[in-house]
Amino acid sequence: MKTDSVVGSGGSQISANTYEEVAERFRAYLATQSLRMTRQREELLTAVFHAPRHFEAEDLIKTLRERQGHVSRATVYRTLSLLEECGVLRKSLFGHNRHFYESVVGRHHHDHLVCIRCGKIQEFEEPRIEEMQEQICTRYGFKILDHVHEIFGACENCQNEPTEARKH
Amino acid sequence: MKTDSVVGSGGSQISANTYEEVAERFRAYLATQSLRMTRQREELLTAVFHAPRHFEAEDLIKTLRERQGHVSRATVYRTLSLLEECGVLRKSLFGHNRHFYESVVGRHHHDHLVCIRCGKIQEFEEPRIEEMQEQICTRYGFKILDHVHEIFGACENCQNEPTEARKH
DNA sequence: ATGGTATTGAGACTCGTTCTTAAAGGAACC
DNA sequence: GGTTCCTTTAAGAACGAGTCTCAATACCAT
Ligand SMILES: [Mn+2]
Ligand SMILES: [Mn+2]
Ligand SMILES: [Zn+2]
Ligand SMILES: [Zn+2]
């Protein structure tokens, strides 16, 4: 399964924000937490900025390993969490197990159709669903922090492919 | 975090179906796959039938270990997958990582509000969301097989608890 | 430049899950 | 019952994503 063949909802390949806008948000966040901007965190940010729309932690690790400036696995995970905390990245699901990240600064909230055959990700936006979610939470006095709404299935291209048989 | 303090949508604690109905479905499925009903598979089925509404694989393993008839870890996972395949069980998310299973025979489809503090699970049913999902899939020529729609946050009880500070 | 925190890298570790393999079980036929 | 040919199992090794540990190093305010 390929890792990324995005069909975006019409946007550009890379976030519409400039690197500086995103970097600024990150720096500001670090400041509020009395955390420091380091060479590693800067490199990670650059890598994230140039990564495809939906990427996995392991992709970043690989990318960075190939370059001069190595960044350790632990640091990658630590930094991804920071970027998530400050609203630069969002973490979602590829399948029942795998995760991917995507940059969300300056983008609308959206959810995903994930093709379980070829890995293609189709983004969708449906404010009415979001609104109903809110209603449901209100009904139950639940304070929503986060949600996961991913739809798994077969994209148009993959629907005609022969199905795999049970292997045993 | 406790593992299960369900507030169901009004249903009974255990699936409304009789054990025999569920067992029959499982046997039928095994037959179609030329698989056999074994002592272990039977014990698993019983354990599943008596488990709380939402349970984890590890819970079952523990339960079975305490009894006379031991069933190995590998067999538990294999059988849970079979039960999922034949529509007896559904697998969902507790958090970004953890999974739980629940019996779905004879129950309506529903999704969950998961309290990230105490682990309480509130089920909800919203046909209009399901319908919109279908519309979206139609729009993109996507054949839906499965979806995950879990909402994470704080339940009514947990909203007033003091928040934990960043630990470092 | 110094000093006191924050940060890092490497690798150990965890945890859920899957894989491997040899031994045991079941069904069908004799 | 015995034989044959599968399927299934148990146990533990292996895996993979992610986290933790801790000694060595980097930041940055002063
Ligand atoms: Mn997306
Ligand atoms: Mn449920
Ligand atoms: Zn596809
Ligand atoms: Zn709660």
Image (cartoon, coloured by chain):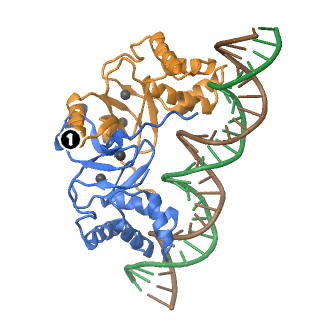
Chain colours: A blue, B orange, C brown, D green
**D9 versus A164 height, above or below:** above
For the image shown, how many numbered marks are present on the structure? 1
Quarter of the figure with residue D4? top right
Which of these two is toward me, B83 or C27?
A: C27
- Say which residue label 1 marks: B139
Q: Tell me which corner region of the image, top left, top right, bottom left or bottom right, holds residue A41.
A: bottom left
Report the side of B88 relative to B138 (left or right). right
Q: Nearer the viewer, residue A162 or B109?
A: A162
Q: Position of residue B109 (x, y in %)?
A: 32, 26
Rendered residue at 51%/72% (across/down): A70
Mark 1 close to ligand 3, CB under 8 Å = no
Identity of the residue drawn at 64% across and 29% down:
B72
Query: Neighbour class for label 1 at 10 Å: few (<14), some, many (≥20)?
Result: few
Residue A50 lies, with reference to residue B129, above or below; the image says below
x, y percentage for residue A98? 44, 48
Q: What residue appears at the point 49 percent right and 65 percent down from the top-left corner?
A: A62
Identify the image quadrant of the C terminus of chain A: top right
Query: Front-most of A140 and B32?
Result: B32
Q: Give left or right: position of B143 versus C9.
A: left
Residue B122: tell me if it is visible. Answer: yes
Query: Could you tell whether A41 is left or right of C13 in the image?
Result: left
Q: What kind of element bears circle 1?
A: helix
Q: Nearer the viewer, residue C22 or B15?
A: C22
Tell me which chain the residue with mark 1 is part of.
B
Question: Mark 1 is on which residue type?
Answer: Arg
Point out residue B146 in the picture as x, y percentages from the top left corner.
Answer: 35, 35
Ligand 4 quadrant in view:
top left
Image coords of residue B144 (percent x, y): 31, 36
A35, above or below B118, in the image: below
